[in-house]
Image (cartoon, rainbow, N blue to C red):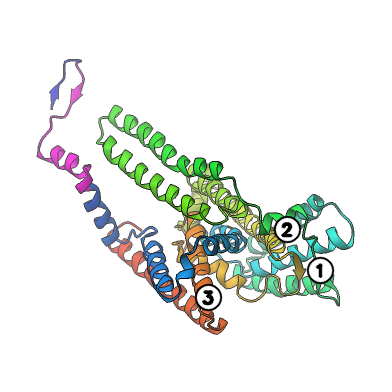
Amino acid sequence: MSQNPSGSVQPMLDRGDERVRHDDSLAGMAKGFIDRVSAGDLGMLPVAVGLVVISVVFSALNPIFLAPNNLVNLLFDCATVGVISLGIICVLVLGEIDLSVGSMSGLSSAMVGVLWVNMGLPIVGAILAALVAGAGVGLVYATLYNRLGMPSFIATLAGLLALLGLQLYILGPTGSINLPYASPLVRFGQILIMPDWLSYGIAMMPGLIMIGKGVRRMRQRRAANLSAQPLRALILKALMLTVALEVAVFYLNLGRGVPWMFALFVALAVVLNYALTRTKWGRSMFAVGGNKEAARRSGINVRGIYTSAFVLCSTLAALGGVLSASRLASSSQQAGTGDVNLNAIAAAVIGGTSLFGGRGSAYSALLGIIVIQAISNGLTLLNLSSSLRYMITGGVLAIAVIVDSLARRSRVSHGRA
């Protein structure tokens, strides 16, 4: 230890400090990334590798797969189930599950058609009624869990059947209601595209935000005499991210452009990610998912956290149903059925959210649903049956769970769980 001219005590640079500075270099960052992966902290690496493999395979089998307009249609399709998957992440972080999100989305789709088309309620009122219904269903699940101790698996399985029956009942014998094609809702789900200049501008924002947050963190660490990430590494990462996003936007703009509906999905993912990572509520969510009893003893309102997660999950499922009606221009008995439940849950898990609770990110839904829709879209272009899509999606989900289990075991062995 020695004193600097200002009189404060500051550790001299020894070999250990030099090692820290080396680790903060670009080569050190790469080594740190490898160490984190070997310790089980995979992040979104598996889904990124999966996307590359899927793109290479399907584009080799059918070049149309990577055509700009096909990717635009893929993004349209991602938004409907992706929004539902955002809600699934909230309950998965707590180590719980909601099996009724598909039925909830189908019911909200039916409500929009009945209230708007059949009963003449304004479209905004019909959408709000569907969202309120979703929140009410989530509140029922939370009450059954908090007050009666009913497992979420059983409560939401019962809800799946009840909501499906209610959907069929309100649609009546016709079973389908066509929505006005020229209405703003249907146009939003089928044809509305962002202006080119706006999409390019939004693509620059993540890199600028990364630099702003990185510089602030760097100054804080240096003020505390701690090692900090070098500025050149921060700028390089932000530049790589910006270039990747701008190239993606440029390629999509060669076709129709970036859909407003997908932009809404991304905006919801950003808001949820901020809430999970930067707010007291989000920290409480991860604390309860990691150890419920420890969270209760630390003063966290555990019942309130569960209530917020179930309500948010069902509300987002209802919003996904509204977007599905917008996309299909109809409310029908088929909405919310089939593989909607599977895809919503699989997207969250494939994207990196743990089934064991305590770990997850809103961006898991974003990447996970792109993987699932890419598989579905690619198989459709190859004129293969839906049976293969179910089997392949199930296999990908199984692999994602295996990777999650192995990564969790590795984190435990390294003391990082």
- The residue at the point 55 percent across, 61 percent down is 69
The amino acid beneath tag 2 is Val
The magenta stretch spans which residues?
Answer: 7-28
- Mark 2: few/some/many CA within 10 Å (<14, 14-19, 20+): many
Name the residue that disc number 2 marks: 186
Q: Which of marks 2 and 1 is in front?
A: 2
Q: Which of marks 2 and 3 is in front?
A: 3
The quadrant in which residue 43 appears is bottom left
- Residue 177: x and y in percent read 81, 68
- The residue at the point 50 percent across, 40 percent down is 201
Q: Could you tell which of marks 2 and 1 lies nearer the N-terminus?
A: 1
- Answer left or right for 6 relative to 141: left
Question: Which residue occupies the extreme top position in the image?
Answer: 6
- Identify which residue, 40 or 115, lies in the foreground: 115
Q: Could you tell which of marks 2 and 3 lies nearer the N-terminus?
A: 2
The amino acid beneath tag 1 is Ile
Q: Nearer the viewer, mark 1 or mark 3?
A: 3
Q: Are marks 2 and 1 in contact (CB under 8 Å)?
A: no
Name the residue that disc number 1 marks: 177
- Residue 333: x and y in percent read 75, 74
Name the residue that disc number 3 marks: 381
- Identify which residue, 381 or 13, lies in the foreground: 381
